Amino acid sequence: MIHPRPTKLQSFQRSALGALLVHLFTLSIPGTAAVTDPRPNIVFVMTDDHAAHAISAYGSKVNITPNMDRLGRQGLRLERCYAVNSICTPSRATILTGKYSHKNGSPVFNTFNSAQPTVAKYLQVAGYHTGLVGKWHLGSDPTGFDSWEILPGQGRYIDPVLYDKDGAKVYKGYATDVITDLGLAFLSNRPPGKPFLLMLHHKAPHREWTPDAKHKAMFAHRTIPEPSTLHDNYATRSDALKEQKQTVFKHLTRGDLKMIPPAELQGTNRSAWMGAVPKEVEITDAQGRRQTLTGEALNRWKYQRYMQDYLACVQSVDDNLGRLTDWLDANGLKNNTIVIYTSDQGFFLGDHGLYDKRFFYEESARMPFLVRWPGVIKPGSTSEALVINTDFAPTLMAAAGLTVPSDIQGRDLRPIFSGLKPESWRDAIYYRYYHDPGHHNTRAHYGIRTQRYKLIHYWKIDQWELFDLKQDPKELRNLSQDPGQQAILTELKKSLYRLKSELKDNDEFTDSLPKDDVDGPPKKWKPGYGPTASSGNR
Ligand code: CA
């Protein structure tokens, strides 16, 4: 990536303070009309657990997402964008700071130290009007936003509670609609003459995947194609995959499957019934006949019920993304606004027999990333450059004309946006997941992905997985024990340790992690704000 060396004046203007002073000066010249700020507005839409392979622009075989597809057609689709720690709180902390978990202090579900610099703070200081609505899930209250209104913890889908610095409020309706309404209100009420940053974070399609009535009906009788790895037997893979507890067949509960408890069950008995895994289920089929499902028939039914609800939640997000972009276009904000659609990580959609995320496998760590930026991004672009979520903050800062501080670990994506292929672009990405055993009994691991290979080390059990993604894109054949692959294994281990060292990730940090990594409500949570709906739904 080669940029001309900036002049001293340009360097000053690109600094946060410089940009602010120039901005204030420009707008306050006596006797002149306010000058339109040329810096781009930014609308950053992020969902929770939306896998790229549930977007038709990414070749989904299970749904059609016209509004996400349209955003991609108007701009760029990143094919190889990854979370560096595939779970909610850590990914969000990385997106805000441009730093890995070991640098921003949020490797697990611990509280994000909101005193540290974030992209929102940098843009706010530079004169941006900054807003946040929806899912936050970082334990502490937001900082760096002129206005914010967030779900407590995980929040709930129906009639959600949101709170701001002054207190909480119940909103009648469905969370995805409500959060979009609040985002549009932020845009409508913004001060004139200032560029803005809106971070609009949906709860959907996070577990427990509760759709609204309209979208539930769309998927209620649909048969969703099964992924080819739904019955993966985990041969050749590590014990970590065999020990996890996030399978569709063995771990989805009656609550996840939206089963109706017997009316006589109340209180803890009712909760226990909902939290148990059903061994048989009675259903009424399309012909109105009663059937008791067990074994393989029950397994396949579970997959359908899970995916029908998940995809119905996604469909509401797609509708609301369309509502948001239509509003921007109708209000003269199309040409100078960057619009991004992404998710905090991917999700298993029955792939490897799983739901949830956490693992460094493709379906889980890969993030959708669609962006339009008229005049900068050529419509219909795609890129296979290796991108990670540390790159988001520096990209937005650079787009706002700021110099990116040297302690930020991500990289400015604008060359990728412009269709350039910088010679110095990264050839491998580093990943580290910390919860162990944590929820779903997932083992901690770190690893690297290059354009062709992936190497994963489950360090606490000292087991390795090596995949040739060109020959084996579904990651079914672990080659780490293959005598013919030892040369590439050695080479990848060297790259892994070099990258780990360059990023200053040391194992002392991991050893010092708090033992209590339990998800929970924000520290300032007050009981009157309503239920957090967080326990068991991470
Ligand atoms: Ca998530």
Image (cartoon, helix red, strand yellow):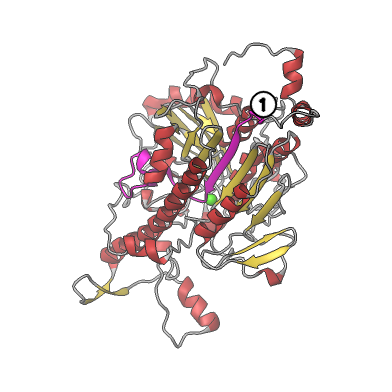
Q: Is residue 281 visible?
A: yes
Give the residue at the far left of this rendering.
287
Residue 297, position as x, y percentages in the image:
26, 65
Query: Image check: 455 left or right of 512?
Result: left
Residue 157 within the magenta-colored segment of the rendering: no
Give the residue at the far bottom of this rendering.
264
The residue tagged 1 is 401
Quadrant housing residue 69: top left
Q: Quadrant of the N terminus?
A: top right
Q: Is residue 419 above or below residue 189?
A: above
Q: Residue at x 64, y 40 (%)?
A: 196
Q: Residue at x 35, y 60 (%)?
A: 308
Q: Is mark 1 within 8 Å of ligand 1?
A: no
Query: Image check: 464 left or right of 134?
Result: left
Q: Is residue 527 above or below residue 400?
A: below
Q: Is residue 480 visible?
A: no
Frontmost residue, 23 versus 235? 23
Magenta stretch, residue numbers: 36-65
Frontmost residue, 504 versus 125? 125
Give the residue at the far front of this rendering.
31
Q: How many marks?
A: 1
Residue 274, position as x, y percentages in the image:
46, 74
Please name the amino acid that badge 1 sits on: Gly
Residue 257, position as x, y percentages in the image:
40, 67
Q: Is residue 406 above or below residue 117?
A: above
- Indicate the secondary structure of the residue bearing disc 1: loop
Q: Quadrant of the C terminus?
A: bottom right
Query: Image check: 250 left or right of 88?
Result: left
Decide: few, some or many residues near mark 1? Use Cα within 10 Å; few <14, some 14-19, many ≥20. many
Q: Residue at x 56, y 32 (%)?
A: 336
Residue 72, position as x, y percentages in the image:
42, 36
Residue 41 within the magenta-colored segment of the rendering: yes
